[in-house]
Amino acid sequence: MEDVQRLTEEAAKLAAAPLWPLADDEITDLLRTAHRLEQAAAALQARLVQQAGTRGLPATQGHRKMAAWLRSTLRIDPHPARELTEHAAALTHHPTLEQAVLDGFIDLRQAAVISTTVAALPAEISGLDEVSLVDAAQIARQAETTMIDMAGRLPAYQLRRIGERILVHVAPELADRADEATSARQEARAHQRRGVTLSLPVDGLVRVSGFLGAEDVATVEAALHPLCAPTPGDDRTAAQRRADALIDVCRLALRTGQLPEDGGEPPQLAVTVAYDPLTRNLGSAITDTGRRLSRDTARRLACDARVLPIVLGGDGQILDAGRTRRLATGALRRALHIRDRGCAFPDCDRPPRWTDAHHIVGWTAGGPTNLDNMVLLCRRHHRLVHHPTAGWQIRLGADRHPDFIPPPTVDPTRTPRRNLYHRRQ
Ligand SMILES: [Zn+2]
Ligand SMILES: [Zn+2]
């Protein structure tokens, strides 16, 4: 105890010492040495935790789990508490690993990876007929030595990847069959653990999180990939393109009309929005699931979603609620497909099935739902034309095809443009 206290004080004093007199290579060397010092302290902690476990200290102090005891004793977060527990477990029954940590060959994260890999090995190979228990123990020992060697070059996360196929290095003749058995086990476990969660919105963002099996992800990727390609002038990040692709796929599925009915009606995004017929103002909108949307978004959705306007009287009382506005469906939609052949925005290549039917004059401003007041737009360009400051205008030309008038920032002469892509054949 006294020794450790003295060391701690010394270390604290050294940590505060000025670093400017050091040469560049001394900074690097010192960083390595400090990491080693940290690992020695961490090894001591791990051994203390292990000892506390053996003596049952957490239980006698009223904690059911080691991690909970550590959190309250050291005032640390759940993650480091769990990690410390894992580190202690890694050193238990692994004297070779413990020595390797104390000698500074490996750090505790690497030790944890090695011990998990080695512990899983017997189960992995015991199912294979010709492997005896003695052989299995021998292979596990070899795996441990091999991985300690590799830890000199590889950080923990890479070591984990190698560990998944450690048999290739220590018993190649068994690797393929063991892989097969492992994959089957992993797939079964992955299938059990699958799940997707949508959180409550915070700052207008909903966290989508969860796990999918490798096979299921392949399906998701196959559907998203063709929609993720950047388009010319596209400034979205890869993650943003993936998010947009996910929404596009869902919207496509909604549009097919082949999803099972939901409460007796075809499933569709439904939005309730307060609407004052005198001022023709839209209030903020609320989705079926209770998420609040801005007025701009409400206006864009009003083009093509099933919107349930709640018409408010002057004193805010509800005059008329829940009547679905007319949508561009059936014959009108087909007529738009024939006229526009896809997103009508200049030179966009999105085909009809990816488009919304946009009202040139908004329905709140009295714009009718007919061919001369509608134009097909993909989601990206639909957002653009609704954007308050983007400045694009749409009007119908003499031949009753839509003209797009660019804002002065794009073309100072504001010459109308058309989509040439869909006219090419
Ligand atoms: Zn619109
Ligand atoms: Zn487009």
Image (cartoon, rainbow, N blue to C red):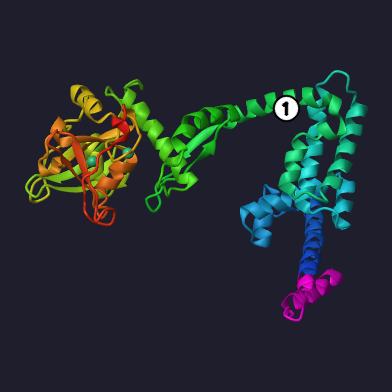
79 vs 329, left or right, is right
- Please name whichever residue, 289 or 281, is drawn nearer the observer in this view of the structure: 281
Rendered-image quadrant of the N terminus: bottom right
In this rendering, the answer to whether 79 lies above or below 144 is below
Residue 64 locus on image (x, y percent): 67, 47
In this rendering, the answer to whether 81 lies above or below 210 is below
In the image, farthest residue toward the top: 129
Q: Main secondary structure of the magenta part?
A: helix
Rendered-image quadrant of the C terminus: top left
> Dot 1: few (<14), some (14–19), or many (≥20) neighbours within 10 Å?
some
Residue shown at 75%/35% (left/top)? 164
Residue 46 locus on image (x, y percent): 78, 54
Q: Is residue 306 visible?
A: no
Residue shown at 36%/29% (left/top)? 252
- Please name whichever residue, 89 or 161, is drawn nearer the observer in this view of the structure: 161
81 vs 5, left or right, is left
Residue hosting label 1: 182
Q: Quadrant of ligand 1?
A: top left
139 vs 255, left or right, is right
* Amino acid on which disc 1 is placed: Thr
Identify the image quadrant of residue 120: top right
Residue 388 locus on image (x, y percent): 24, 53
Q: State whether label 1 is within 8 Å of ligand 2.
A: no
Dot 1: what SS?
helix
Identify the image quadrant of residue 368: top left
> Which region shows up in magenta?
1-27
| Magenta run includes residue 16 | yes
| Magenta run includes residue 370 | no
Residue 403 locus on image (x, y percent): 20, 41
Q: Is residue 91 visible?
A: yes
- Please name whichever residue, 55 or 107, is drawn nearer the observer in this view of the structure: 107
